[in-house]
Amino acid sequence: MDAVTVIAANDDVAARDWREAVREAASALVDAGAAGDGYPAACERVVEEHGPYIVLAKGLALVHARPEDGGLAVGVGVTRLAAPVEFGHPDNDPVDLLLAFCTPDPDAHVGTLSALARSLSGGLADRLRAAPGREDLAGVLKEAVPDA
């Protein structure tokens, strides 16, 4: 498994559009010390350049950018929106839950991303949506990424 993963959580976040939602989700990693100040803008550019492929499932987006765009540590954050936003994905809009991810180098995150993928296929998004508050969101995410 990876070194310790930094966990961040935001709840009831107001976002006018996908850009603001992406910036808020990535900013949680900045606030937790896992990403540099430029990371939220880099995550927004990913969607601008490549479209809404980050919307992985109904209502769920995985916000990320390249390691060299500001990853300081392996970090995973969850942001639950107060109201869903549209990303322009043909099947999985609107998005109410954003997982943000960062890593300092291309290899450091493999175990964390694998654990996250397994947890997502095992109902992680539903558990996150059911969590009553910010601390509970963080706790559910910590369980999903055991090395955190």
Image (cartoon, rainbow, N blue to C red):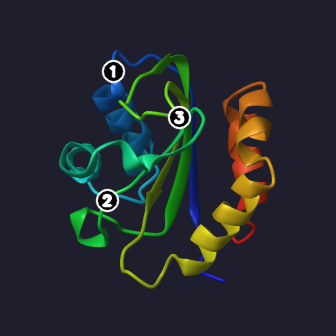
Task: Give whichever of discs 2 and 3 has the lower sequence position.
Answer: 2
Q: CA distance from mark 2 to mark 3?
A: 21 Å
Label 2 vs label 3, nearer the camera: 3
| Circle 2 SS class | loop
Determine contact: label 2, label 1, CB under 8 Å: no
Check the image and name the residue furthest to the front: 90
Residue at (35, 58) in percent of width and height: 35
| Circle 3 SS class | loop
Mark yes or no: residue 148 visible.
no
| Circle 1 SS class | loop
Circle 1 is placed at which residue position?
17
Residue at (38, 55) in percent of width and height: 64
The foreground one among 16 and 12 is 16
Residue at (75, 67) in percent of width and height: 146
**In the image, residue 144 above or below residue 130:** below
Q: Position of residue 147 (x, y in %)?
A: 70, 72
Q: Quadrant of residue 12 in the image?
A: top right
Q: Position of residue 1 (x, y in %)?
A: 66, 83
Q: CA distance from mark 3 to mark 1?
A: 15 Å
Circle 2 is placed at which residue position?
65
Task: Give whichever of discs 3 and 1 has the lower sequence position.
Answer: 1
Circle 3 is placed at which residue position?
92
**In the image, residue 123 above or below residue 4:** above
Q: Quadrant of residue 136 in the image?
A: top right
**Which amino acid is tagged 2?**
Ala
Q: Is residue 140 left or right of residue 110?
A: right
Q: In what quadrant of the picture does the C terminus appear?
A: bottom right
Mark yes or no: residue 46 visible.
yes
Q: Position of residue 4 (x, y in %)?
A: 61, 73
- Badge 1: few (under 14), some or many (20 or more) residues near its Cα, within 10 Å? few
